[in-house]
Image (spheres, rainbow, N blue to C red):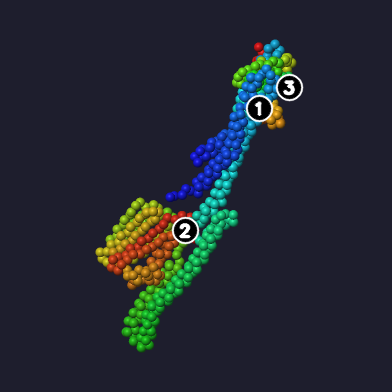
Amino acid sequence: MKLPSFKVQILVIIALLLLISGYITHAFFINSFRDYEKDMNSFDLYNKTHNFYLDNKDVIDKEEMRDILQSINQSELTTYLFERRMTQISASYLIVSSIIFFLIFFVLLHVLSRPLIRLRKATKKVRAGDLNVRVKENRISPINHLIVSFNEMVKELEANRDKLLKAEKDMMWREMAQVVAHEIKNPLTPLQLSIERLEIKYEKCDNENFNKTFAESLSVIHEEIDNLKHLVQEFSRFARMPSSNYEFYDIHSQVQEIIKPYKESANIYLEIKNSLPKFYGDKLQIKQVFVNLLQNAMDALDKNGKIFVKLNYEDNKFMFTIRDTGKGLSKQEKSEIFRPYYTTKEKGTGLGLAIVRRIIKQHQGEIEVNSKKGAGTVFVLTFTEHDKKLFNDNQD
Amino acid sequence: MFSTISKSIATIAVAIGALLQTNLSPVFNEVQIDYTYDKLICSAKLKECFNSDLDKILISGEKIRIVYLIQILDKEKEVVAEKKFFHEMSYDLIDKKFVLFLSEKEKYEIFLQLEEVKNRFTTLQSIIISKDLQDIESDNFFVILIAKLTPIYMDSLGKEFDLLKYWNNKPAKFFSNRLELKEITR
């Protein structure tokens, strides 16, 4: 059974208190005096005395009787006026108590609900990723201990997040350092060998062979230098993400534009489910995501392969799916594809999907991959519509 | 249980009704001022001056008095003439009749019905103010009527009971517009 709201509960309590006040007033004030008045009237003293006078008016002095009747009437009048006065006092009591009850109601509402509203707002911010938020503590608030616990919890979360980020960063840099060292070491060997070969040929002064070897060695050196250059470029791209520029825009048109050039060399099908509202994000970064995922899908396809791109909006969520019918991924590959410098391609840098994941994370989104060797791969991107302000704050 | 709740609600309603019951604000109605043979004649009716409590007091046998004051003011609003008189009524508890004394006429009138006596009690009938208004400069003047309930002494309370509280503790007042003699001369 659904309980009525807090306000309704308090109002019901106040209504009950008022009823009790009314009952007390009735029982102890008005009723008592009415009973007393009724008792007095039941004597019917005036009429009885008057009748007695009429029966014996020859022997009773009229003026004396007038005084007696006046006294009786006066006493009845006093009772009546007193009862009227008590009714008014009761009314004042009821009105004053009502005002007090309502004051208590509003004070309670204020004392209880304001910190609750603050807590709710803070929880929302925490949910959006803002761990700097704190709720103002108020010692007289009955939920102050809850506020204190909340603040401590957020503080701990913030500390843990910072530690985690630091650890993740350290780990990433170590991993990257290893990979970069490895990648740089690879071209160094052919470079070294080529130079050694040139030295040997030069010492032997065998012009014919030297010219041939010189040309070959130069070619290897150029190629390896190009590889190193490409590696360094990709590395700096990954290391330096450009600043974000968030806006509302039509993602449907954007995706149509992106897939246009790919359609010439592959079977790409675009499907829109439900009408899409404006998407809030960085246009360039989202383009990079789609380009990377489409390029990966293209690379995985055989001659008759197909790519299905699906855009959907449901329950305040954007859901984008890129499915290919390519060679798919093994369990091992699936678990590592987002790791920087991990690649299954001959000439890949292994940074594409790492960049994709980073962009999606920055957009408060999620990326999921489903794949089976030989059965194709599906990437599912989900973006929940957040409070835009918090969303923006979170990017800073 | 149900009767308790209904009694409680009824009590709240009665109590609040009693508190919200506004006190009376009597007013002079049907005011007529004429000037005839060098005399100012004033008639008026006091309205909205009784409630159930006052009715109860009227039939208690106490002597209830309304003091009336009629004043004539010149254009500077200085009092140039006035007449003070009263109406006093009481209920004869033995003969069960109302006796009304009109001091301006120095006569008693007898009534059997409360409504009749109340009507006469609050009526100013051709009250004559002897004043030669020709003296008033530029013939412009004002008339003020004032009525006030006086306190009664109640033996049972052992003190005075101020009836004027039923009139918001204010006497009933009427201020005429600026009057010109030729307009009201008959």
Viewer-nearest residue: A157 or A357:
A157
Residue B74 x/y as whole percent: 72, 20
Which quadrant of the figure has residue A173? Answer: bottom left
Quick check: A381 left or right of B176? left
Q: Amino acid at mark 1?
A: Ile
The mark found on residue A128 in the picture is 2
Counting from the top left corner in percent of width and height, residue A28 is at 59, 39
What residue do we see at 69% from left, 30% from top?
B156
Amino acid type, callout 2: Ala
Crowd band around label 3 with a 10 angstrom C-alpha radius: few (<14), some (14–19), many (20+):
some
Residue at image point 60% right, 38% down: A29
Q: Residue A72, which numbered label?
A: 1
Disc 1 chain ID: A
Amino acid type at circle 3 is: Val
Using the image, determine if residue A3 lies above or below residue A72.
below
Between label 3 and label 1, give the one nearer the viewer: 1
